[in-house]
Image (tube, rainbow, N blue to C red):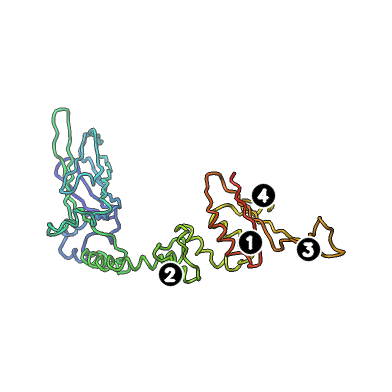
Amino acid sequence: MTQSNYRPTLAIAIKLASMQPPEASDTSALAGLAGNNASVAIANNLLLHPGEPGEMLVQLENLGERALRWRLEIEGDFPLNWCSWQQEEPEEIGANQKVDKALCFQIPEDYFESQEALNYGRSRLKINYETQVYVYAETETARQLVAYRVFNLCVRPPSSYLNFLPAIYREVDFIGRFLTIFEQAFDPAVQTIDVLWAYLDPLTAPEALLPFLAHWVAWPIDRRWDTKQQRRLIRNAVELYRWHGTRRGLRFYLHLYTELPLDEDLPEAEKHISIEEIFSNGFTIGKTLIGTDSMLGGGRPFHFIVRLRPSASKQIDERLVRYIIEREKPAFCTYDLLILYN
């Protein structure tokens, strides 16, 4: 916090304090060589970043021997909607008492990118604004100006590069603005590196990158699948390869398409994706009972039944389901497909 003092000849003293880190001020570390007046001017700055709130603390002190009713007003060449200060009625301050008030400012987040900022008809974008603080003493019949102060609003883009410099350089406004040029230029590349993992995850990668990720895992792109389903398939391609030709692999593939639950804790006959394998020993003398666990001719060895139980509101493409089963099942197996809508 940096402070500057102003002691008027009348009954109220006013002090301003910028509620910001000293190294972020729009100042020069060498300005102190210019004398005390330069130091006072340096303190009367409030640094604002687009989209971030800033506060200027105003402290009033009644130097008189009697209470005063006061009102504070704000003027300046900045848009009025940047400041949230409002005072409906005059307030009273007792003799030799102090009152602290905060002036809150916030500029639009797109200040540097808005159409007004990009207007080519302007010679330069305004980034410094002057603000006047007036304090009036009021009675029932009149009011009198008893104190005033002036400070500057300095609008600057935020810069993280300043954090890597010694403190003396962070206090030089030109260096901060100069480094911002490079930060804005390199920021897209830095942001991309920070989230590089998201570009390699099929669930979060840009849609244009999905064919590249699918090629990594040798997964064919099928236009019958929507983008969400394609992402899920590419993400789980290795898992599907691992369990290819098994009941677990087929159930998982159907789960990715239909989004029906796997129901690991339910018996096979009650699952939303039920795959029932039909086994028999055929004609084997001495080990089986005819009609019970064996058959004579016309058998269907290596046969299974797939039952899907979607809700009535969910439509299942039977041709696509059969394509999935044909892709996953062993070549010598046969199957029946039943889609049972609830």
Q: Residues within 10 Å of mark 1 (few under 14, many from 20)?
A: few
Q: Which amino acid does label 4 sit on?
A: Glu
Q: Give whichever of discs 1 and 3 has the lower sequence position.
A: 1
> Disc 2 marks which residue?
212
| First of labels 1, 2 by sequence position | 2
Q: Mark 1 points at which residue?
A: 248
Q: Distance between the residues labelled 1 and 2?
A: 28 Å
Q: Nearer the viewer, mark 4 or mark 3?
A: 3
Q: Is residue 175 above or below residue 291?
A: below
Residue depth check, mark 1 versus mark 3: number of the one nearer the observer: 3
Label 4 to label 3: alpha-carbon separation:
28 Å
Residue assigned mark 4: 270
Circles 2 and 3, Cβ within 8 Å, touching? The answer is: no
Label whose residue precedes the other's in the sequence (4 or 3): 4
Tell me which label, 1 or 4, sits earlier in the chain.
Answer: 1
What is the three-letter code of the residue carrying label 2? Phe
* Mark 1 to mark 4 CA distance (whole Å): 16 Å
Would you identify the image quadrant in which residue 195 lies? Answer: bottom left
Which percent across, then down, holds residue 180?
Answer: 26, 65
